[in-house]
Image (cartoon, helix red, strand yellow):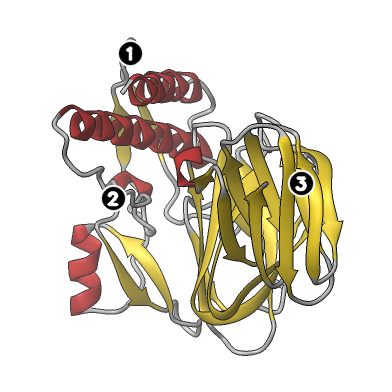
Amino acid sequence: MRAELSRALDAYEQAKRDFVGGQTWADALDVLRALDEGRHALACLDALLTDGPLPERMPLCFFDARHGRAVRQVRWAPPGGIARDIAVCAADAVRLAESPSPIAPRPEAVVSRLPGAQPRTATFPKTTPVSAPQPQVSGKGSSGAQTHQLAMPSYRPALMVFSTSERARVNLRFEDKKGRSSLLYRLSGDGTPVIARIPLPEAKKAVAFRVFAAGGREAWTATPAPLREVPRFHGEINGTGSDVVHYRGEPGPGVLRYEGPSVIQLEALDDRLAYRVTVAEGSAGEHTFQWPGRGYFQVRSAGAWSLSAV
């Protein structure tokens, strides 16, 4: 409960800081995302106080962040483009059901009132630049020709949750290596859809990446997520492809088992989810190593693996 309350207060403070600026479309998006983060934190706090289920986290509306949080996923394609799943608000979902044409942001003046701040007015352009960061990025297959930009959330540190609708093999290449051991991440569902958590240690407002899909045109989605999305374990955990795990055990011997191509690496991350050191590495088989202690660890592989404490 304290963590959710702290997250809400931090988000509202971030919104006030972001509201001071040149009143550009990017400035407004930062404010809206921070406010949305604060509202979600308070909703989580209410759920914890009443022992209710935690609210589902949806991004802001794909077409216009001023519409508020999305309520559902719909299938949509831009003129001449490829259909993909996008998250939209209730009004845009109705409009798309009636007419599948694209919905552009409206050029209107928006007045925002933040805690402890005076009202300000900002006028936004009619369209959002194609290269503008998005709170959720989605596509279908990819040759790596396009650079995508995922907007960083107001909370830090954060993860990227990358998932596909069907089984796939995907290479994810980031544009900036800062805080990472490598630019390239090999993701594989090993016969199942991909779901991978990738650390986002950068302090920038957006992270740029490219997607290389090995055949097929499976739909994929990249979404920021908080640390609570990381699976925790004490004794043993298993998975497929690259992922992030939270080891809750004590320092001591461990075993890494791997079935897959190339090599697997187990990397220790610092409290900002930045790369610290490689603690285990090897090809298919069983490898022993030493757990340095509790913390977040990144598995980098293209096959099935398991981790255990001895």
Q: Residue at x 35, y 62 (%)?
A: 87
For residue 105, what is the image quadrant? bottom left
Q: Residue at x 37, y 48 (%)?
A: 65
Dot 2 falls on a residue whose secondary structure is loop
First in sequence: mark 1 vs mark 3: 1
Q: Residue at x 47, y 56 (%)?
A: 136
Depth order, front residue of 163/255: 255
**Pointer 2 residue:** 56
In front: label 1 or label 2: 2
Q: How busy is the neighbourhood of tag 2: few (under 14 within 10 Å), some, or many (20 plus)? A: few
Task: Please indicate, yes or no, whether residue 126 appears anywhere in the rendered image.
Answer: yes
**Pointer 1 residue:** 118
Give residue 163's position: percent from left, percent from top: 51, 67
Query: Seen in the image, is 167 located left or right of residue 259?
Result: left
Q: How busy is the neighbourhood of tag 3: few (under 14 within 10 Å), some, or many (20 plus)? A: many
- 240 relative to 231, above or below: below
Name which residue type carries label 2.
Glu
**Pointer 3 residue:** 267
- Labels 1 & 3 near each other (Cβ < 8 A): no
Indicate the quadrant containing the N terminus: top left, top right, bottom left or bottom right. Answer: top left
First in sequence: mark 1 vs mark 2: 2
